Each structure stands twice: as C-alpha cells, then as structure tokens.
Image (cartoon, grey):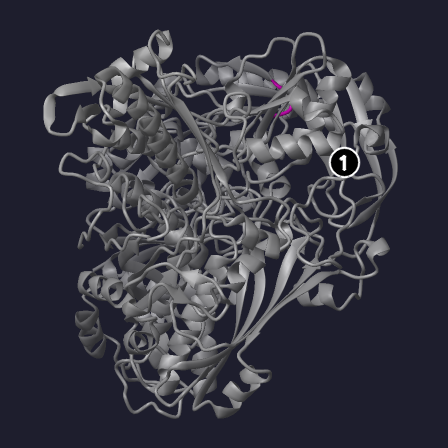
Amino acid sequence: MIPAKFDYVRAGSAEEAIRLIGEHGDEAKFLAGGHSLLPLMKLRLAQPSVLIDIGRIRDLSYIEDKGDYVAIGALTRHHDVEHSDVLAEHAPLLAHATKHVGDPQVRHRGTIGGSLAHADPASDLPATTLALGATYVAAGPNGTREIAAGDFYESFMTSALAPDELLTEIRVPKMNGAKWNFQKFNRRALDWAIVGVAAWRNGDSAGIGLVNMAGTPVLATAAADAIASGASPADAAEHAADESDPQADLNASVEYRVHLAKVLTRRALEAAV
Amino acid sequence: MTITDQPTTTSTSVIGQRLLRKEDPALLTGEARFTDDLQLPGALHLIVARSPYAHARITRIDTTAAAAAPGVVAVYTGADLTDLWAAPMPCAWPVTDDMKSPAHYPIAVDKANYVGDAVACILATTNAEGRDAVELIDVEYEPLEAVVGLEDALSDRIIIHEDLGTNASYTWPLVVEEQEGAVDRAFADAAFTVKERYVQQRLIPMAMEPRAVAAVPQPFGGDITLYTATQVPHILKVMTAITLGIPEHQLRVIAPAVGGGFGSKLNVYAEELLCTALSRKHHVPVRWTEERSENSMATVHGRGQIQDIELAADAEGKLIGLRVKLLADMGAYLQLVTPGVPLLGAFLYAGVYHLPKAFSFSCTSVFTNLTPTDAYRGAGRPEATYAIERAMNRLAAAVGVDPREIRRRNYIPTEAYPYEAYTGLTYDSGDHIKAADIAADLADYDGIRAKQKDQNVEGSTKRIGIGMCSYFEMCGLAPSRVLASLNYSAGGWEAATVRVLPTSKIQVVTGTTPHGQGHETSWSMIAAEKLGVAVEDVDVLHSDTAISPLGLDTYGSRSLPVGGVAVAMACDKVIDKAKLIAAHQLEASAEDLEFSGGSFTVAGSPDKTLPLAAIAFEAFTAHDLPDGMEPNLEAHVTYDPPNFSWPFGTHMCVVEVDTETGSVDVLKYVAVDDCGVQINPLIVEGQVHGGVIQGLAQALFEGAVYDADGNLQTATLADYLVPAASDVPSITLGHSVTPSPTNQLGVKGVGEAGTIGAAPTVINAIVDALSGLGVTDVKMPASPINVWTAIAEATASSGGDVGGAASAPDTSTSATSGEDDQ
C-alpha cells in the first residue's frame, strides 16, 4: 500500500499541465481526483515517475449551457455533475448515471474527465457519454481537437488521447426531452457494474451504451436500430449484446454477462417511455 | 419480548440498562491508540517477502541488492534465522494422538507452501524504504503443482509435506450409540431420510484493523514488551516464551486498542515471533504493520469444509439418527487451534433438537496449498448449524410439512432442561418454541406464506421466500476438564481481581481481552451492581500481562459467562471481607449485617450503617482492622465454569429473488436471540447486528476464491465483497430471556449468535423462494450468478418452469404445497 517512488508537480493551468507533460514524457501521469490512479499506484500496478497534479486547475471545472449541447469541464467533480440543474434539465441520464459512481466520498473527489480518460469499460460514465453521442475536447502542444466518444475508446484502458494531450471538456448533446433509463447491476452499491446499461429513446431514435461488456464501452447499435425500426423493447433487447465481447470474471461468466445485457437492456427500454 | 426473573437485579438495577459504551468516545474521536499509533523512536520496520507461488521449492535467494538498498539494516532468509527458534510455531490443539503436523517456522526454509508464505524479511529504518527494498530480494523458485481442492488433497496425488507422507492431518471420530449399530438401525428403520452435501466456502475474517506488532526491548537485562493487535496476550506470552526459548517472566505482552479480530487474532503469528526475536537480536524496537492485501493472504482464513449430513426420521418426522462426515481444509500449516475448529461443531449437529443416542460424526482434515485456516466467528458452530438447519428443511419437504412444523416436532421441550444431550453434554436451559413464535410474529410468517401463493406464480420473475433457523450458540469456553477430553492444551478458566481503592473507586482487573466487545462497560456495570457504586467509579484494566497476569482472553463468546462471572464472584469476596471490617467497626456480628446500595447496615438498626467508602479507607490506613486481617480491600477469583452455556434463538428472513438476474433482495431480517440475562441490551443488540451481517455476508457476498494454481483471486476489498451498510437490511430484533442456571448472573454469551443463525436462514429463504422452480440448493455465497445458475440447472432438469407457488417437486409427498421449502 506504499507506492513506488515518484515526483510530484502541480500545474496551475491547462497550458502548464501540457508543458509539464511535454517535459517529463512518457513516465508522467496526470493526477486529477486520483480515485483510479492512486489505487493502482498503491498496488504498484502503475509506477509513474512523475505525477502532474491538475486537480486545482479551477477553470476546468464548469457546467455550461451552450445552446445545443452542455459543456462540462474535465475537472468537474462527479458530485457537481450529479447535482447540476443544467444537466438535470438537458442531460438527465448523465446526471443520474453519475449518482451510481462509487460512493459519496469518491464522487466528491473523482472527476468526469479523469473517469473518461482512464477508459475503464467497467466505469459508468464512458458508456453513458457514448450512448449520448458526446464529444470530448483534448488540448495538446499544438492546440485543441475534438474526439467523438465513439472514436475515443481504443482498447482496454486505452484512449485516443496522445501522451501529451489533456482531456479538457466534455460536450454532451442536449437530450431534448428524450426518455431515458440507467441500469446498473452489481453486488454492492459502491462496486463497478457487472453489467450496466445507459439508454435513451426519442421517437424513432435511440442510444444504448453498455458498461463492462467488452474491453471498451460498447454502443449497442443493433438494439438501438431495432427500436428505431419499431421493434418492441423485448425484441430489440435480444440484439443488445451483438456488438459486445465480454470477458468472464469472478462475478460473471461470458454467457451470464450476455444474458444480463439483454435483460437489463429490455428493462431500460421498457422503463424509458 | 418477555423478561423473566433476572436473578441478581433489584428495582434500581444497573444490570439491564442501555448504557452507552465507555469505550466509544476514544474510538469515535480517533484518540484510541492502536499498535501502529505507538511512537517508538529508533524502531526498525520489518517487511516480509512473501511467496508468489502456492507450492514451490526455494532453490536460491540472493539478498545482495536488497541489503545494499537505502535504509536497509538487515536482510534475513529462513536459513539465517533457524538459531532463533527453540521450537516450531505452536499448534495448541493436537486433536488426536496421531495427528500429523508439519514443522512450521516463521520463515520458510526450503519450500513455500502457499501464496503469502514468508520466504525472507528485511529490517529497514523506514517502512517505505523497506517496501522498496523487499522487491529487490531475488528468490529463485522451482514451482510445483498446487493442491487447491479438498478431495484432490485427500487423494494424495501431490503430497505437500513430503515428510508426513500424506496430506491427511487427522481423522477424528465421535460415535455415540446406545447400543452398537444404533445409527445403522435408525437409518434402516427410518420413514424418511435426508442426505445432503454442503460446502462451506473459505472466508477472510477481514478485521477493520489489520495485524500490527511492535516489540520493544526494555533497558538492560533482556526484558521485552510486545505490543500486538491480538485477542490473546496471555496465551501469546506463554507461546512466545516457549517458541523463542526465552524466560516467560521477561516477556510482557500488551494488546493496545484492537480493531476487531473475529478469531483471526486468536493466534500466534510469524510476525509476532520475528519482531520479538529480531528486537532481541538488534537491541532496538522492531515493528511491523500488515497491509490490507497482505492481510488477505497472511492472516488465517475461516470455514473451508465439505459437509456430508444424513438424517433419519420416523413417520412423524422426528429425528432418530444422524450421520455427519466432514472434510476440512487446514490450509498449508496448522496454526494455533486450526485442527480443533471443526470439532467445536461436532456437538451441535443435532442443533436444538432431541436426538436419541444414534449419532456418528467423523472429520478428516487435509492440508492444501492455501492460507492456513483457524477460528473465525463461530468456529465450527456456524458450519454445524448450517448443515442441520438446511437439512431440516429438506426433511420438512420430505415429510410434507412446513419448516416451522418440522422444527416444532423436534425441539427439545422446555421442561426437559437441564437436558443431557446424546453427546453427554448438558444443555442448561432453553425455550425454543417461544423464540420461534416471537420470530414468526415479527416476520409475519403466515402473512408471507399467504403472499407467496399470490406472487410465486408461473411466469413470475420476482419470487419471495421465507427462511428460518433455530440454533444453539454453545458459549462459555470452557470447563477445563472437557477441554482436556478434547486434547486441548490449555484450560478454560478466567481470572478477575476487584480492588477497592482508598478513595473508594473500583479497579476491576480482568483476564479477558476485549477488542470491540465493550467489556469495560459491561464489567463496570457488573461491579457497580454488586458493590453499589456508580458505573463511572469503576475502571476496568485488561490486555496487559503485567497488569493482568492471569487470563485466557477473548474468543468463543466466553468472556461474559466465564470472565464476567469471575468479576461478579470477586465482588462477592470483596463484600465478604468488607463485611468483617464493617462488623468490627460497628461492633456488630457479621451475620447481622446487610449490604445494600453500597453500605452495610446492622439488621434492625438502620442508623448503624457504614458505607463501603469508609471501609476502603480503613483497609488502607489499617489503623483498626480485625486481628490478623491483611490491610487491603481486594479479592481475586479464578473461575473454571462447570458447564458450557447454551444461548439459543430463531432467525427468520424474507427475500425476494429476481429470477431473471439471480439477484437477491433481503426484505426483512428478524433475529430473536436468548442469551440469558442481558447486562447491557445495547451491547447485546450491537453484537447481534454485527453477527447477523457477518453471517449474511457468508450467505450472499463473501468467499475467498483461488484459481487452480492456488492464487488468491480476492485479495483486495474490491474483489472480496465485505458488504457495506448500504448493502444490508435493517434487522428487526426480538429476544427472550431464559437465565442460565449455571452461573450467578444467569448470563450465557452473545458474540457469535448472529453469525451462527444468519447463513442458513438466508439460504433457506432463497431456496424457499425458488422451490416452485425446482431449486433445492444454492451454492454460497448466493451471488447473482450462483442463484441464476441454480435456477437454470433446476429448470433444465425439470423441463421448464414447474409453476405453482412452493410446490415440492423433489419429494413424493408434494401434496401439501404452499408450505414446503423444497
């Protein structure tokens, strides 16, 4: 429970953070809320030689109505996402899903950007923002770029962020009154989901994101397309795992995970009316 | 719900009050001092290098790089330290004369036998430097195939300890027959038989505070003070002296604030011996604090049994015979009481039921390449209770009656107490129907049965079930002669000293070692009640062998019925002596004195009175004591209980099972525990709450999972699912009070009752909910996948949903549906 030796520097701005990571190279990691990185370091599964603390960059913590989308600063704490009036009105699925992250202590420290950049397929927010068609903004030494959530998750805990890029903003399209539901299936309230489903539907369109059903969060497009074509939730849910490639672990076999994905997707679609 | 006579109480009784615990302000403000909180200038930190292999020969260890690392003072392998050990690590319970036990030293020399087995250690000036350096110890292993399964171990396909020639440590039989062949005859004559196999998964005790040790040499002369997070400082002192070959009187063992144990700190551990030996060798304090994931591997586990149980019953479903065969997992070595744990259950396999003398029990225990097992809350008794209480539901189904009814037919009748059981033990008192009726009222048993008929219908994906368990706890370890008959290497007595100080404040010195149980509060209440003083005027001293030199510590729910009773007896002796002083002072005959409210009064002369405070000062000045009387007012008692005590009760649980996902929702949990007279009901309730949650955790959440190579898959709290407050139900408590006739307080003990009752209650409820689908058993923990798998298997074998609420598809007497568990 004692991490390997590391150096610590604190960045006062996004620009400084990017400059610092350019100086320190591959062995450096950004530290935001620390709720994913620090446990890995304590177990010595991660041994960065430098931590660049971005946790106090205040101007990356905001939630703003931008017309057709809501912009969320990457360092916004889960607690603030959970309780945001703007999100409650325009992206309630995200605010609700965030309630399911860890426990209150985790939600007061952890940040939305940290959770997404960590790219853990078992986390609630990658699949939720994927279902919502969010866009992420990354800043690097050569300026900023937008990355669609669908292009962001490359493999297990690996994102499209370059080593010298910092995730700065999450842009979530307004849900425009879409009906939604979030299903998180786990054994203890504070655990990662064994399987989770974030779903919304609005007339003929629908979006379904799956938690922990592959090495990356999964967009269940076949099931969403079925809904768009008028299928019942039960029939659409039969296709819930078509895009998945789940792994077995202590809590679930592959077969059971696929079964859960179908049951939970059906329930989510039935509830989202 | 009902209070019967409380033998020692009066209208102004302290006993029975819901007093807040004296211990809690220090704990809640963070001011309590645990072992790791101790400031020890100059202490070296011990770090233990542990085997990553479950079974491997150690072919070479290169310590050069580690020894050269910053802050490292010394690096030792097992071979370096052999001179420090006068004897192997102790096992105090050689259950049979031919029991096989491998020599076990604090650091392995040739072979590592489980993941976490110590293979080397470091002394460093800081913990952080030591943790860095331990990674530099280069150990070359020759990995061997690991023995993980119990039946595989028994096959001796791979023998772990070659010098023993087998993996079987012992077979311990207990056959009780009125006449030879009685058990076989019972089964031949039986109208109903039940034959079941149950698996008790391994559990990690996971005390809130991991283990911690600090050995501090005293100035000149070789004395050592050993601070350690232990339940057993007294036992540890004796065993450390023997194992290290150092004079016992040079050792002082102190258990500072200890954050729970659940049996896992009832032991003598390698790190305690290493810190002590190395502090003597280096003449500086040596300390060690366990990490959480280290705790998962290096601290003993609990349970780990395969149970085969067979019941024989007559036409009415009354038990006439019982056979039990256990296969128990010892792990890689025998720790302090490892082999005895399954035996503690041997006496409880007939539960709270009348059984004629037709009982056969045998336990075979095997070594595996896993962490050693040992006592864990309940130690043998939860396992036994689980088996009989699950099997009784199977019997109910076979007979075609409700689980409540099968129990009612078999309970030992209240008027039969004291009851001599088939094993020869005498049960002190009980009223099982009353406890069960209270529980049934609180759980709305009949209402749930009615609701099931509406809800558990064909196609329903939310099925409800109700389960119950009636149990004995078997506390008050133990009459020393009974322990002798079980080959246990110690007695079961407990010591207490009660001292009235010159200013009339009271010191109680106890040999029990509280680590969360609240003895300071309860013992103060006993002394306050007896001596007529305020609870705040009593101080309880414990857990330091220099202050409390005699004691056998805290485990097995023994503290109150043995140690608490000793306190009461010592108070009586103090009163007896004070009475002689009072008689002398009041110029009255001792026989004419009455003691009440802290004062002696001459019978018939209410103005002739003398308070205890005045007597205490007289004893201190010694100016005018009766001739020949020693000038003090204190008394010492060492109490060996004449019998175990037998708390009992009934638990009930209502669950709703989501049959699509296998998820179990506990809707209601009712615990009715009769622990005899309650000293402090608040503490009793806390013990029952914690115990129930721990048993419910075995039923639903926890399990130490190993892969085929013997790697622990659940070494962190992310994978080993200790439930949090948000994951468990509120508990409805009821109680009855049936005083124990074997001690003057009428107390029985309560530490393990909740754990003993909960696991079978929960599993019985789940099986009840799913009985309409043909489910007859669910593997523990009843995780969603295990429940889902049980449903899938039952549905496959019965060709689909068999419909109907609570029918009994696996019995020939399924006509009385609606009441059966199966």
Quadrant in the picture for residue B539 = top left
Q: Is residue B503 left or right of residue A186?
A: left
Quarter the N terminus of chain B occupies: bottom left
Q: Out of B240 and B509, give the one closest to the viewer.
A: B509
Q: Is residue B123 left or right of residue B260?
A: right
Residue labelled with disc 1 = B107
Q: Out of B449 and B687, give the one closest to the viewer.
A: B687
Is B279 rendered above or below residue B484?
above
| Element type at mark 1 | loop
Give the residues in magenta: A2-6
Q: How many marks?
A: 1
User: Of helix, strand and loop, which mostly describes the magenta segment?
Assistant: loop
Q: Is residue B162 left or right of residue B328?
A: right
Please rate how many residues cluster around mark 1, counting C-alpha atoms within 10 Å: few if below 14, some from 14 to 19, many from 20.
many
Amino acid type, mark 1: Ile
* Residue B527 x, y percent position in the rendering: 31, 30
* Residue B426 x, y percent position in the rendering: 43, 62
Say whether residue B443 is visible: yes
Residue shown at the point (39%, 42%) measured from the top left: A125
Is residue A5 inside the magenta stretch? Answer: yes
Taking the view exactly as shown, the residue that stands out farthest to the right is B59
Mark 1 chain: B
Q: Out of A264 and B483, give the one closest to the viewer.
A: B483
Say whether residue A230 is visible: no
* Residue B116 x, y percent position in the rendering: 69, 41
Q: Out of B31 and A261, give the one closest to the viewer.
A: B31
* Residue B417 x, y percent position in the rendering: 33, 65
